Image (cartoon, rainbow, N blue to C red):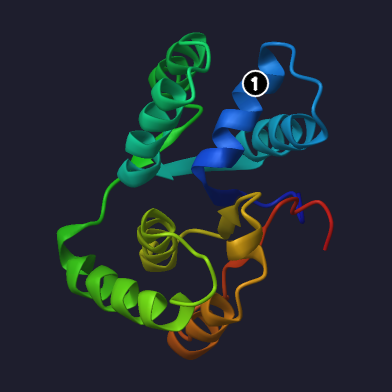
């Protein structure tokens, strides 16, 4: 993690799934990274997942026929306070909608999916979030996302989008 201060990272669906796959013996490098980063983030602050991520998580696990143990892991992390499920606060709903539209316009040709647009907008709307943890190359390399971050996140430290915040 970048510092010993409390951190708050939002997590993308693929990152969360890889973290739990590591827990069940997957030796993939991404699973190892996700598990290490998420556990460090829990130790030094908190990890948040939007309701969009939670819904997509269930969909991916069922559709790709992953072990249903991953759903139990998700429930366990939520129940034990290791993962905070976050919602768009009513006073931020207009901002969330505005950012969703701006992101969608900027990333239209970059391969960033509709669900990812909502996940990004939620992370950008959350004033306490340090950034988004993801392995999605379309998000990580998106010039449109960076443009929206630069132009529309000005009253606080700009969130980072990264696959490993331990590397700066």
Q: Residue 97's quadrant in the figure?
A: bottom left
Say which residue label 1 marks: 21
Vertical placement of 61 versus 106: above or below?
above
Which of the pair 100/87 is nearer the observer? 100
On-image quarter of the C terminus: bottom right
Q: Residue 121's quadrant in the figure?
A: bottom left
Neighbours of disc 1 within 10 Å: few (<14), some (14-19), many (20+): many
Which of the pair 10/139 is nearer the observer? 139
Residue 9 showing in the rendered view: yes
In this image, 164 relative to 67: left or right? right
Vertical placement of 6 versus 64: above or below?
below
Which of the pair 141/79 is nearer the observer? 141
In this image, 99 relative to 129: left or right? left
* Residue in the image at 52% along x and 11% along y: 67
* Residue in the image at 39% along x and 18% along y: 79
Residue 159 at x, y percent in the picture? 57, 68
Return the residue found at the far bottom: 151
* Residue in the image at 48% along x and 86% along y: 154
Q: Residue 22's quadrant in the figure?
A: top right
Residue 10 at x, y percent in the picture? 51, 50
């Amino acid at each position: 993690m970048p510092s010993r201060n409390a951190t708050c990272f939002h997590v993308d669906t693929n990152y969360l799934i890889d973290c739990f796959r590591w827990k069940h013996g997957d030796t993939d490098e991404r699973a190892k990274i996700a598990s290490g980063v998420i556990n460090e983030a829990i130790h030094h602050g908190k990890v948040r997942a939007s309701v969009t991520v939670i819904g997509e998580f269930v969909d991916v696990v069922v559709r790709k026929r992953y072990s249903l143990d991953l759903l139990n892991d998700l429930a366990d992390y939520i129940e034990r306070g290791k993962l905070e499920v976050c919602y768009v606060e009513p006073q931020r709903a207009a901002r969330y909608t505005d950012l969703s539209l701006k992101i969608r316009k900027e990333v239209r040709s970059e391969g960033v999916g509709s669900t990812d647009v909502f996940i990004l907008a939620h992370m950008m709307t959350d004033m306490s979030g340090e950034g988004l943890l993801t392995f999605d190359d379309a998000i990580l390399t998106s010039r449109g996302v960076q443009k929206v971050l630069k132009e529309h996140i000005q009253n606080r430290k700009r969130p980072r989008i990264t696959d490993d915040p331990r590397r700066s």
